[in-house]
Image (cartoon, rainbow, N blue to C red):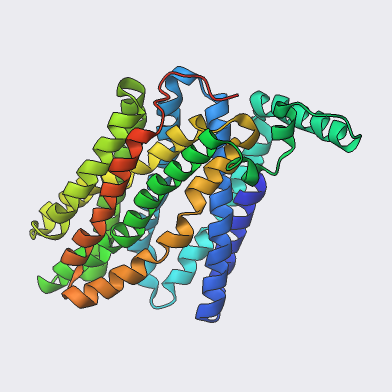
Amino acid sequence: MIYAILAYSILTGFTALSFSWISFALLRFLVGIAIGSEWATGTSMMAELWPKDARGRGAGLMQCGLGIGFFLASFLWLFVSAYGPEAWRYMFLIGILPALLTLWIRTSIDESQTWQKTDARRREARVRKQSGATLSPDDQALTRFTVADLFAEPETRRRTILAFLMSLTTTLAWWGISSWVPPYIASVAAKANLPGPQWASYAGMAYNFGAILGYISLGFLVDRFGRKPIVMLYFAVAFLMTPVLFLWTQDLNLLLIAAAVNAFFTLGQYSWMSVWLPELFPTRSRATGIAFSFNAPRFIAFLGPLFAGTLIVEFGGYSRAATIISCIYILGFCVAPFLPETKGKPLPA
């Protein structure tokens, strides 16, 4: 986790020195790899260190860091944007600051004892395998390549596929809809002869304020009512809120409120991953299962903005395009019931 934080912080800082769109895209690609690695590792550690009866709340509080970061970025842009066409470079330069957190992590956060015990058993099993000894089924599972382990047993394979589809729903909808909220509100402001960039910042802050509340609330709600009903509720309301934001609201002040409510469910639903994913996989492949479920859909979801752009051109604006893309929430709503309810249960061994 420390290496991943250092990687995405330093690479973000280097992005400020981009000299072409190719160098910019390559650096952002590498940053994305590092972020995906850090999130999966941190989520796995949090689940193993937090008490089982409060695991959802802990995951929700952890996940809200994403919204806080976006909120701070939107707030900073209010001031940094005044530095002209090269202002974006200063924003990326500020992104190097998280590297300082690794000093605190190294001295203040212990390794998970659950993982340490499994890692010790894995090392012993590998030694026995190298010596030619006959391994038990459990030891054979410990020595498998962890990605292969996700698909080796029928139940784990089923959970992996279902988690992938739900993650695809959340991720594709976010990239294909949510990323257009600031420019959409900016376009409405411009039509009213108001400064578009300023209202884009307002939209970003409102959206991420709602997201922070959504992240935290999902964690508390799933600990109270269970994983399935709350995640399905978030998918359903996110689907319904898309036309409210993009089709039925025109007043700018109401748009900011609608953006915050929309974010509560669209971005807030990301907390289901940090809550539910660690509870679906055994310790020997937990971080790998989380990483695969979270990151594999991103290789598909990055197409979301491209298709959204095509739809925007085809339908002459953001509104109908966003509403069409929001239909992906139906997939997540239909898949969620097939995953096991894990509220209050210990993590798989």
Locate residue 314 relative to residue 288 in the image: left or right: left
Locate residue 284 relative to residue 312 in the image: left or right: right
| Residue 195 horizontal/vertical position (percent) | 20, 70
The single residue placed furthest to the right in the displayed view is 131
Q: Residue at x 33, y 31 (%)?
A: 228
Q: Residue at x 54, y 36 (%)?
A: 154
Q: Residue 166 appears in which quarter of the rendering?
A: top left
Evaluate whether residue 216 shows in this view.
Answer: no
Q: Nearer the viewer, residue 279 or 270?
A: 279
| Residue 41 horizontal/vertical position (percent) | 59, 41
Q: Residue 226 appears in which quarter of the rendering?
A: top left
Q: Nearer the viewer, residue 50 or 328?
A: 328
Q: Residue at x 65, y 24 (%)?
A: 114
Quadrant of the image containing the N terminus: top right
Question: Does residue 202 sit above or below 291 in this rendering?
Answer: below
Locate residue 86 relative to residue 258 in the image: left or right: right
| Residue 198 horizontal/vertical position (percent) | 25, 65
Q: Residue at x 53, y 81 (%)?
A: 20
